[in-house]
Amino acid sequence: MKREALVSGLDVGSTKTCAVIAEATGDGRTPKARVLGVGMAKSGGVKRGAVRDIEETTDSIVRALRDAERMAGVKVPTVFGGVAAENISWQMETGLASVTGEEIRRQDTERVDEVARAVSLGDGFEPLHSIAQEYKVDNQGGISDPVGMTGMRLEVEMCLIGVHAQAAQNLRRSVKRAGYGVAEFVLEPLAASLAVVTQDEKELGCALVDIGGDSTTVAVFHDGKPRYVGSLPYAGGRITSDLVQGLSVTQADAERIKERWGVAYTPMVNPDEMIELPGTPGQGVRGAKRELVAHIIQERVDEIFGLVLDRLETGGYGGRLPAGVILTGGGAQLAGIVELGREVFAMPVRRGSPERGISGLVDSVQAPRYAVPVGLALYGVQRRVHGDAAGGTGVNRLFGPVKRWLQEFF
């Protein structure tokens, strides 16, 4: 196996660190990722997407990548790392350039893109991605690729995404201390979309909702492009805390109850079903209705979905997402969460588990919690196949016309 064909996606979250090692297969037109190894480790060194404890974060990275390497039987020198939406800036800029030839050439689009990028992201932020939303030729808009057209005036509407420099630096340092390098950082919801969202869904309009440990990320796609990314400080950790209070159990026991008995939609539970709660020093083993557990969970998930819906409507996407909502992240694994989502959002809702463009140990990653690391590996495969995986300041042309291979995704 060629060393240069190996890629690794690393998702460092607030409750877990996931690593996926894959091999680039296929050809330049249809590159694919053959999953070779998967690793997961508990993590407590990251809060709201930022490293708070470098030692603990480093340790979780070491354990996750070590397990993935052991399963794959290979070592990887670098990783493609995910950046949380809490640590980004998102702004729209316009670039303008004159067309010098008889028709618009690739050099013209590169030049107008550079004009749009030549904008300060503000103190404390470094470039992460730039995404061309649309081009205009002589004031005619709605053009995705103007190459070959005739005109005198070329404009681009560019989305510039920056990452908080300190957050990126601390994550990069944690990866380095674990013994690895960072090939590139990629915004997590964009990476996840590569693994779980179809191109048709992006064209029609959809929302990717990633329910993590201490935050929920919302990404909107429309006309094939990412149009909005935001974050909410409510997620799976709040559900666990509610169970601690409502059932008078420890944090660890509440997490186990949520995983084993948790349901996010009360009508799915038999009202007469009882479950056994762990005993405490002051009392023995207790019983509780499973319906009570479901009610506690549903109340919090309903609140989270309500906040997501508010974001969608405020952004002008209410009723404009025919492809509906795709749920990912560890919280999306709750039974009944799809049914509750359909009731709250009044649109199609499904779970997003990685299955697009992958082979190999597919069954090891077919769960919503692996959307980000698999998406990062898929992104890395694209970079490897096209011989453009150098490290540096980020993926400044991630979705621009120079990177033609990503047009199939965005």
Image (spheres, grey):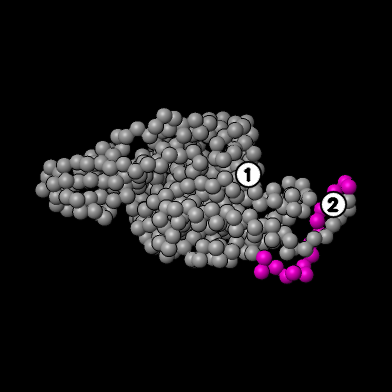
Mark 2 surroundings within 10 Å by alpha-carbon count, few (fewer than 14), some (14 through 19), many (20 or more): some
Q: Residue at x 37, y 41 (%)?
A: 91
199 to the left or right of 38: left
For mark 1, give the secondary structure: loop
- Residue 275 x, y percent position in the rendering: 79, 62
- Residue 104 x, y percent position in the rendering: 17, 48
- Residue 101 x, y percent position in the rendering: 12, 45
The answer to whether residue 36 is magenta is no
Disc 2 target residue = 279
Q: Is residue 248 visible?
A: yes
102 to the left or right of 128: left
Residue 384 or 157: which is nearer the viewer?
157
- Residue 304 x, y percent position in the rendering: 57, 54
Residue 312 or 359: which is nearer the viewer?
312
Specify which label sits upstream in the sequence, 2 or 1: 1
For mark 2, give the secondary structure: loop
Residue 65 or 106: which is nearer the viewer?
106
Relative height, residue 182 to residue 32 (above, below): above
Q: Residue at x 85, y 48 (%)?
A: 280
* Type of amino acid at the residue the image marks with label 1: Thr
Q: Residue at x 40, y 62 (%)?
A: 320
Q: CA distance from mark 2 to mark 1?
A: 25 Å
- Residue extent of the magenta highlight: 266-282
Considering every residue shown, the one lying at the far left of the view is 102
Q: Residue at x 77, y 63 (%)?
A: 289
Mark 1 surroundings within 10 Å by alpha-carbon count, few (fewer than 14), some (14 through 19), many (20 or more): some
Q: Which mark is residue 15?
A: 1
Q: Nearer the viewer, mark 2 or mark 1?
A: 2
